[in-house]
Image (cartoon, grey):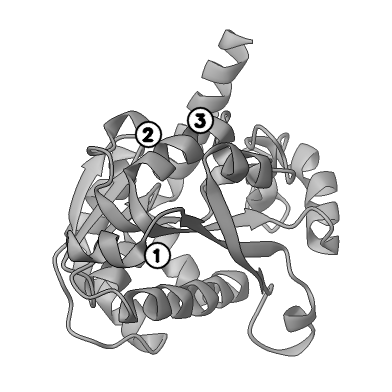
Amino acid sequence: MVNRARSLAADQDRHFDERAATWADRYRSHPSFRARLAVVGNAVDDELAGRPDARVLDYGGGPGLFAELAAQRATEVVCIDRSPSMIEWGQQHRSELGSLLAEAGFARAPGDVRRQVGDEQSLPARGSFDVILAIAVLEYVGDPVGVIGALATALRPGGTLLATVPNPRSPVRWAQRIAGPVAAVTTGRPGRIADQSFATIRPHGDRVPWSRAASAAGLDVVATTPVPLGDRGSRTWLHPNTLISLRASGDECEGLRHG
């Protein structure tokens, strides 16, 4: 079991290192990524609009696109990711990330983002953040209960965790479950099927036990929002992902006063 977990982690690291240089461009060229940016971006904006002087963590944030978006409003933003390639690319191409956000309608002045390589073991002290983002991350985690518990510990009272998870009932996910094994033997071959190889490196597949993990961490489910496959046409009818909003128990006002 340990060897399998290590092998899976190595496959994940290789997958995301190989895609680091093109990750941001996917938010410009892929309809599903554009839809994700729109839905999640608006949720981040709405959350931070009511939190002056907020501190934000973008956990597993890759090059830090959502970290840069949060920094347009927040006082302090930290982006943590396991991939050095993702972190390095994001640091070196901040202006490109800003242009991408502006094209998507998030055109405010940029703020500061602190990037670092790490995982849940690298989280700052208890109660450090008002908002934590975990966008397209939890499906790659072997221990969602442990990771969500660690993120909950890093939240202030009344803080919010915004995360996306796969929707296992979506026809898109059914198709990926078929294409994933095929993609595993198309190494080096371009095309849509080969690009579905990520489906084979998710420990829980499409069924991330996020609800059980949230309950174990003492987080309340505030809202679930479908994330469509695209922003127009038939793609808007398909919802392969769900945005979940989780709230830490406690007095939200107290959490803000300590900002």
Q: Residue at x 81, y 46 (%)?
A: 177
Amino acid type at image mark 3: Gly
Going from the N terminus, do you reach mark 3 or mark 2 first?
Answer: 2
> Of helix, strand and loop, which one carries label 1?
helix
Q: Which residue is mark 1?
A: 24
Q: Dot 2 lies on which element? A: helix
Cβ atoms at labels 3 and 2 below 8 Å apart:
yes
Q: Nearer the viewer, residue 223 or 102?
A: 223
Residue 103 quadrant? bottom left
Q: Residue at x 44, y 76 (%)?
A: 41
Instruction: Looking at the image, tell me whether mark 2 or mark 1 is earlier in sequence order.
Output: 1
Q: Which residue is mark 2?
A: 120
Identify which residue is drawn at 66% across, 78% down. 230
| Residue 9 pos. (x, y %) | 51, 26
Position of the N terminus by quadrant: top right
The image position of residue 73, as x and y in percent, is 23, 77
Q: Looking at the picture, does residue 111 appear above or below residue 160?
A: below
Task: Identify the residue at image location x=29%, y=81%.
Answer: 99
Judging by the rendered image, the residue that carries numbered circle 3 is: 146
Q: CA distance from mark 3 to mark 1?
A: 29 Å
Sequence-wise, the earlier of marks 3 and 1 is 1
